[in-house]
Amino acid sequence: MVNYLLFFGLFIVCGAGSLLFHEVGHVLIAIANNVPLSEIQFGWYNIGLSVTVPSYFPRQSLSLYHYAGGLISGSILVLLFLARNIKPFRSNMTQEWSAYPAWWINELILFWAVFQYFNGYLEGARFIDYASDARIMNLAVIFSFPVSFIANACVTLIRNRISHPRSRPMHA
């Protein structure tokens, strides 16, 4: 029971962190376009936090502004995933994957990364739909879990193959 509560807590913390980094991505693009921090409005829109820039924000940078949140947040989470997975070629990697808690933590990180990338795509390429209908986020959730699950499984298989190569017969 404690493991489930811990995992749920990590899910919430990772989700909140990805949302925070998402909004920071928007703020960074606004600041890079010479918008003072005092003129950036923070608020609540549909089902989440929002960052609103003033009307004089350059139109040629608006698309980048929309894409930036998901790209920056997703990239930070992918870097976290890589940091957790590049080094650990240890002997305990042979455990059954479903019983291995670190595998599920990796899945959690990848889920939020894929979610943020897809969210960034929706916000950038389909902003009108994204801004007017919160149900479009259901697509991001439905898409994110299988993609992150398959990616995590592939990384695990590759890592295990590298860590424990099949023994080769010795030739005389």
Image (cartoon, rainbow, N blue to C red):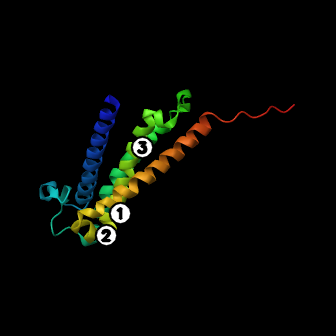
Crowdedness near tag 2: few (<14), some (14–19) or many (≥20) residues, C-alpha within 10 Å: few
Where residue 161 appears, as percent x and y from the top left, is 61, 39
Does 152 sit left or right of 105 as displayed? right
The span from disc 2 to disc 1 (Cα, nearest Å) is 7 Å
Q: Residue at position x 40%, y 58% from top?
A: 143
Disc 1 marks which amino acid?
Answer: Tyr
Q: Between residues 164 and 61, which one lies in front from this camera angle?
A: 164
Q: Find residue 106 and report its image quarter.
A: top left
Q: Residue at position x 37%, y 46% from top?
A: 77
Q: Earlier in the sequence, mark 2 or mark 3?
A: 3
Q: Between residues 59 and 14, which one lies in front from this camera angle?
A: 14
Residue holding disc 1: 121
Q: Residue furthest front?
A: 1
Disc 3 marks which amino acid?
Answer: Glu
Mark identifier at residue 107: 3
The span from disc 2 to disc 3 (Cα, nearest Å) is 27 Å
Q: Between residues 9 and 51, which one lies in front from this camera angle?
A: 9
Where residue 4 appears, as percent x and y from the top left, is 33, 34
Q: Nearer the viewer, mark 2 or mark 3?
A: 3
Q: Nearer the viewer, mark 1 or mark 3?
A: 3
